[in-house]
Image: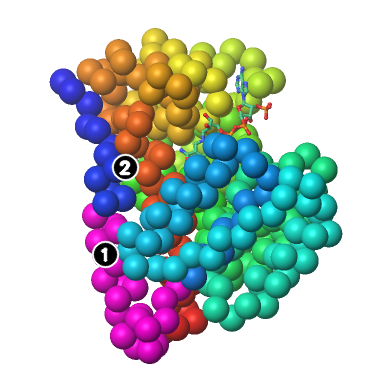
Amino acid sequence: MSALVLDGKALAQKTEEELSARVAAMKEKSAGQTPILATILVGDDPASATYVKMKGNACRRIGMDSMQVELPSSTTTEELLAKIEELNANVNVHGILLQHPVPEQIDERACFDAIALEKDVDGVTCLGFGRMAMGEEAYGCATPKGIMRLLEAYNIELAGKHAVVVGRSPILGKPMAAMLLNANATVTICHSRTQELAEHIKRADIVVGAVGRPEFIKADWIKDGAVVVDAGYHPGGVGDIELGPLKERAAAYTPVPGGVGPMTINTLIYQSVDSGEKKLG
Ligand code: NAP
């Protein structure tokens, strides 16, 4: 039987319609004001520039404003911190996105952590992560939160299931594992030092691939009827998981492209609208 396709593109489109209506309602109540997402791009990495542009376009599609801040690749940690402080203090800014990665002379962690909690709509601060992990209110890190929203939209049962997350990065694997744990899954986190990776994955009801290597996780490591979530995207349109053979054997899977990717940007604007509503009503 064919696996259920967890269609992130369709869910993102549907959510954009709802967000557009919420932004329009906010504009009406607040004399034309909309939520504003400030995006910060440091340096001239073309991929980062494309991601920032896509995020600005998503804001425009739902009628929200974005403020684009571009800084040269020679920017220091102090200069970037000063810019973040300025945006924290700007009452018209409701969300701040610092595009990862920043040039290597910058202390990225210090800069992420300088973002005010209520404006951390990309979910990158240690404080936001800690609060989320403890089950307190905080915006979730955009990619794993997008995955959770996708699983929820398709009523994928998580409680009591064994989830194996492959990858433990601050923006993906670690918050993903905490979110699945909060949803009462039993969670195994694998990484580059994990021994017998295939054996761990074979026991998974839910597999999340967040490794950054094309088709690194093989289809025959994954049991029949598993839910397969692939966060990767590589040239040639493949992810971190060998999805081909799983389209018949899995219970459900995220396609690449069109699964996790669209949900990341969608979660960023979703959380920005929420932050705007808290300030603009
Ligand atoms: P990352 O920071 O490079 O982390 C990769 C993780 O994979 C690390 O935890 C690493 O373990 C682990 N790993 C590497 N080799 C491994 C191996 N042989 N066996 C087991 N684990 C191994 O990458 P990331 O930022 O989390 O991104 C992961 C993937 O998600 C990438 O494909 C990226 O393109 C994609 N992504 C997608 C979106 C989106 O919007 N769709 C957003 C972000 C990322 P160690 O910790 O031990 O080094």
Work out how far the residue at label 2 is from the one at label 1, CA to CA, in angstroms: 15 Å
**Above or below: residue 149 compared with residue 2:** below
The residue that label 2 is drawn on is: 8
Please report the bounds of the magenta region as a residue range: 14-35
Horizontal placement of 268 versus 190: left or right? left
Which residue is painted at 75% across and 58% down in the image?
80
Residue 39 horizontal side relative to residue 43, left or right: left
- Answer yes or no: is residue 184 visible: no
Q: Residue 105 sits in which quadrant?
A: top right
Residue drawn at x 78%, y 52% as measured from the top left? 75
Which residue lies at the image location 56% right of the left edge and 16% below the top edge? 197
Q: Is residue 102 above or below residue 279?
A: above
The residue carrying pointer 1 sits among few (fewer than 14), some (14 to 19) or many (20 or more) residues within 10 Å by Cα, namely few
Q: Which residue is mark 1?
A: 18
Vertical position of residue 204 compared to residue 59: above or below: above
Which residue type does callout 2 highlight? Gly
Q: Please, what secondary structure does the residue beneath circle 2 have? A: helix
Which residue reaches farthest top?
220
Name the one closer to the observer, 83 or 186.
83
Farthest left residue in view: 1
Image coordinates of residue 215 in percent, x first then y, are: 46, 16
Q: Are marks 2 and 1 in contact (CB under 8 Å)?
A: no
Residue 30, picture quadrant: bottom left
